[in-house]
Image (tube, grey):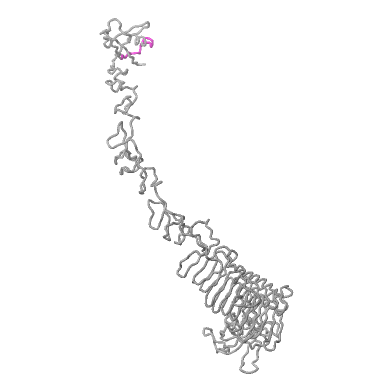
Amino acid sequence: MSGMTHMVWLSRSNERRCFEREFAMSSRPLWFVLLLSITACEEDKTDNSTDPGSSGEGEGEGEGEGEGEGEGTATVDADGDGFAAGDDCDDTNSAVNPAAVEVCNDIDDNCDGEVDEGVTTAFYADTDGDGFGDPGESTEGCSAPEGFVVDDTDCDDGEASTNPGEEETCNGVDDNCDNDIDEGVTIVSYADSDGDGFGDPEIAIEACSAPFGYVEDGTDCDDMNGGINPLVVEICNGLDDDCDAATSEDGMVSFTDTAGSTTDVSATFTGSLSITADGSYVLCDGSYMVNLDIDAGVDFTSVNGAEYTSLDGGGVGPVITVAAGNMVDLSALNITNGQVRSSASSAGELGGGVNVGSGSTVNISDSILSDNIGYNGGAIHVYGGTVNVSDSTFDNNGADYGGDLMVFDGDAVITDCTSTDAYAETAAYGYVLGFYTPATVEIQGSVFDEGFADRAGFYAASPFGQPVDFVIADSAVTGLSASDYGALSVYGDTIATSFDTDWGTPAGRDDNLPVDVYTIDNGSAATNEYTYGDEEFFTCTDEGCETYVEYAGVDATLYHARDNGSTSPGVFACELGFVFEGDPITDLCDACDFGFSGTWVLDSSSASTTTCNLYDEDFDQDFAFAGNPSYFSSPMLYLRSGYEYTYAPWVPLMTATRTGDTVVGTYGIYNYPLYYYGTYYYYTDYLKIELEVY
């Protein structure tokens, strides 16, 4: 150990001082050094003075041998804080020493070489002077410099009105610095496409104010209709006018005039009602006890269909009477319980359901005519007018003449309808009478079943020479029970035609009784009876029935191709096409179903050459079709030329097939292959006729 430093305390003038002295320790024992150090620091209690000889050098002796010399330097604690100047970084300030606690005062209080470490405060620039500082611009110090504050929550230090102390206003700015813009102060507005002041709840935006085309009310249930919103009064139209699903339309009737103005007429739509204004009626679910006298162009329809909406005559008169010269449409209604029947025919006993006046046209669709009774025409009576009925049902209608229908000098077209349980003394289904003017009935795609009558299902009669035309196609007349006549009875100047219609069969247990067709000659009173089956084609007059029918027209083409030895199939040296122009005829070949007389006109667009000897000019030729020809087992197409001669022979030309109203006949060979020395040669002499009758 080369040396050691000890603190030596000396007392002088009642002041205690300590000197450092360095001793050479090379020859001194440790206990001697310690003893010397302790002795040197003892206080002088006698005179409070220090021996001048102790200024720096001295000797000491102890029990052991040895001697030592050293020097000591005394450090003054001027501020009396217990730390000498060598350890105190400011011996003039007792609050500054290594044991002091650092405080923020721009002084190194604890003498660690750092000033105010860990005790400063962060201050933030408050450029806008609102008391809230910018967290992005700060300084550390013991007090806030000018323009700085302790708070660092300002989100826009360039705007004094933006800080956490502000209330949020709707301006597109985060006024209160909570990272939300305009929270809780915007309004929700809704698109108002129809301009009725009520918006679509499905199209909404949040903003400080409603933009153009938007409103604050979002209760519109149809924003494409300005007549629908919560302020509108509910009317019967199948729409939720007032946007309240709880508002019922049951029992309501609305009327819209020709100017487009709609009013609620529910209160007056009852009893005997005269209708003289053109317009449209809409009926909501309910049963309406009415007897309507219509002298206007109107239409009636229901919202939910005939099953839910009925016009009930109450058994006290016709449900609907249409005066002369009007156009009336009836749709999706149940016309029921009309009754006009006494012991004799009169003007007030025509048409229990609907009575159509002279020159008027009534269109009935998607409706039910049920439980109506009339003397003439239980469900419908037509006098010199027209009725068109489609997609509708006749049920349990009755009359003396024509349970479902009575046509007196007028026209009726029945399409895709069904009749059940009709009853009458004469003509359960329909009575067609040409009295003063011609009468026609056309039935398409309809079913008449289980009718009952004393005489006939349909009765077509012309007692005074006014022609009656009765046509039924693609339909069924089955299950009639009659005491006399037949399912169809024909009398006088009448032509009745059946196209592909089912007349029932015993095997199917739906045959008509007593017969299917009954004819009465107007002159001789001779009668004929006929029984038919399914898919029957025939034409009847009062003199009897034939298997032919008379179509209104035909679309017909003739194609002729020929080639002798082409090496490619379908390649012909000659091809010719013709189209037919002509009219139906009734002077047909034996067992022919229908025929036409006219001219085959060359199609100028068809390819043609003269090397094949094909006829390439227009030519006159009649044709006819027989589904069950007399001398052949297959259906045939017949041709007739030279008909200017009296015998006018019909010649069977080709076998044919029929599908509905389409007939196709073919003749000859088509691409017949012949193999010769490694090559196929194809031969064709082919004729095809295709007919579409209507």
Residue nearest the viewer, comparing 397 with 573: 397
Query: Residue 183, relative to residue 559: is it above or below?
Result: above
Q: In which quarter of the image is residue 180?
A: top left
Is residue 684 visible to us here? no
Query: Residue 235, relative to residue 160: is it above or below?
Result: below
- How many circles with numbers are drawn on the protein? 0
**Identity of the residue furthest to the left in this view:** 52
Measured as percent of width and height from the top left, residue 552 is found at 59, 82
**Identity of the residue furthest to the bottom in this view:** 645
Residue nearest the viewer, comparing 349 with 687: 349
From the image, which quarter does the C terminus lie in? Answer: bottom right
Is residue 340 visible to us here? yes
From the image, which quarter does the N terminus lie in? Answer: top left
Measured as percent of width and height from the top left, residue 541 is found at 66, 85
Q: Quadrant of residue 313?
A: bottom right
The magenta region covers 20-32
Q: Is residue 30 highlighted in magenta? A: yes
Q: Is residue 129 highlighted in magenta? A: no
Residue nearest the viewer, comparing 590 with 211: 211
Measured as percent of width and height from the top left, residue 15 is found at 28, 11
Q: Quadrant of residue 495?
A: bottom right
Residue nearest the viewer, comparing 385 with 390: 385
Q: Which residue is drawn at 38% across and 11% down?
A: 30
Report the side of 644 relative to 193 (left or right): right
**Identity of the residue furthest to the right in this view:** 507
